[in-house]
Image (spheres, rainbow, N blue to C red):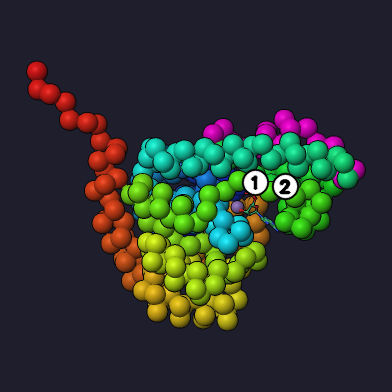
Amino acid sequence: MRIDLHTHSNRSDGSDTPTELVRAAAAARLTVLGLTDHDTTVGWAEAADEAERSGIALVRGIEISTRNEGVGTHLLGYGVDPDDAALVAMLQRSIASREERIPKILDLLRAHEIADLELGEVAAKVTDGGTIGRPHVAQVLVDRQTCDDVPDAFRRFLGNDGPAYVARWTPEIEDAIAVVLAAGGVPVLAHPRGRRGHVSDERLERLAELGLVGVEVDHQEHGDDVRRGLRGIAQDLDLVITGSSDYHGEHKNGHELGCNTTDPGQFERLQASMRLQHPRARVHSTNPPHEEQ
Ligand code: AMP
Ligand code: MN
Ligand code: MN
Ligand code: MN
């Protein structure tokens, strides 16, 4: 069993369509694939169709941008009911803030005489129904040959310390965990000690008390020491340990499908959590009972 629980399609900032992603997962000999686009579930239906054809188990997920102690922190939610009202409201607010931020970024790029980009060019990089983000601005900067590649655009202009950085609204992680749980989903902390931010042992303990189920330990942004430390605290807190690629297709190097995987025993625990949550999710998605004529 090869299990990769965190990947992106072009419904957020990956380059593959959901169909292409599932085919690439089959080619990479994955048996279980988690699709976790940023702040959206719109890729699920297409991925599910192709997963059935390819004989791959699809785990329906989402990667929600949140804030932990004021620092941007990503939360994975597996098996959420995509129609849950509180989840939809939270994501809509996030997406509105993503959309408001892009023209401000373009203003800063102009003010600093870095580039003069049209909003339409950036919007054209987003697949219908997908979420817009800084990577789409980065792609246009690469097209214009202002930047060598997407990481170069983040390093010089768009990153958190860059001249064109604009903050945006995201939910507090405590609230996002509560919303994921109430939507019948299973919350797992994504790359908690990656390039940006460091979720402390104390905060992990607090989040576990609030219902966090798992923590992504094996991730490309975690070195050996970080993985060892996180594995230890996850075991102490009885959290499920996941590993994944965070694949973005051509839009991120060094994150090939299956470069990190989740241990089947840990996946079994995650599935048990999802089964516990599932009956509630089903109630949301089935038609209400109707009276016999
Ligand atoms: P946004 O969601 O608009 O805040 O953009 C953040 C996304 O940009 C992350 O989810 C990453 O996929 C991508 N990203 C962040 N930093 C870099 C980087 N240095 N190089 C390439 N992609 C990055
Ligand atoms: Mn991304
Ligand atoms: Mn992330
Ligand atoms: Mn990701």
Q: Which residue is mark 2?
A: 166
Q: Relative to residue 55, is residue 117 drawn left or right?
A: right
Viewer can see residue 161: yes
Say if disc 1 is inside 8 Å of ligand 1. yes
Tell me the tag on residue 180: none
Magenta-colored span: 113-129
In the picture, residue 69 is in which quadrant? Answer: bottom right
Quadrant in which the C terminus appears: top left
**Kind of element beneath mark 1:** loop
Q: Is residue 237 above or below residue 150?
A: below
Residue type indicated by callout 2: Val
Q: Amino acid at mark 1?
A: Arg
Q: Which one is nearer the viewer's eye here, 245 or 172? A: 172
Q: Is residue 277 above or below residue 231?
A: above
Pointer 1 residue: 168
Q: Is residue 126 magenta?
A: yes
Q: Is mark 2 within 8 Å of ligand 1?
A: no
Residue name at image x 31 percent, y 66 percent: 268
The quadrant holding residue 291 is: top left
The N terminus sits in image quarter:
bottom left
Give residue 127's quadrant in the image. top right
Q: Is residue 25 magenta?
A: no
**Circle 2: element type:** loop
Q: Residue at x 39, y 75 (%)?
A: 237
